[in-house]
Image (spheres, rainbow, N blue to C red):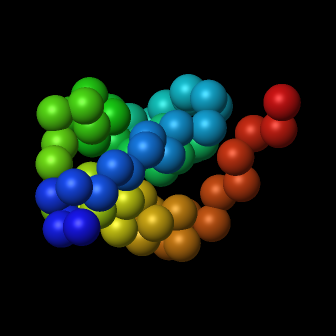
Amino acid sequence: MSGADVHIPTPCIMVCTLNDDDVCVGCYRTLEEIGGWGDADTEERLAILDRADDRYRSTRLDPPRN
């Protein structure tokens, strides 16, 4: 299976709240990344996930508890 064939599901955890930088405190994607997820290919999705992980690690924010 090539990388183009890999399905990468959305990282959304249904905590859709943006901080002051328009970054979701649930999945750590920007508003632009969230909006573009559906059209993103595998490579783009992996890059989005890497950036979201970097944001999570740098902010050390805990997602709100339901």
Residue 13 visible to the viewer: yes
Note whether 41 is above or below 53 in the view shown. Answer: above
Q: Nearer the viewer, residue 42 or 21?
A: 42
Note whether 22 is above or below 62 in the view shown. Answer: above
> Residue 30: where, in percent of width, then height?
34, 42
> Residue 37: where, in percent of width, then height?
27, 37
Which residue sits at x=63%, y=66%? 60
Q: Quadrant of the N terminus?
A: bottom left
- Give left or right: position of 3 versus 23: left
Question: Residue 66 falls in which quadrant of the image?
Answer: top right
Name the outermost residue toward the front: 1
Name the outermost residue toward the right: 66
Which residue sits at x=61%, y=38%? 13
Residue 51 visible to the viewer: no
Note whether 13 is above or below 42 in the view shown. Answer: above
Which residue sits at x=70%, y=46%? 63
> Residue 46: where, in percent of width, then height?
29, 62
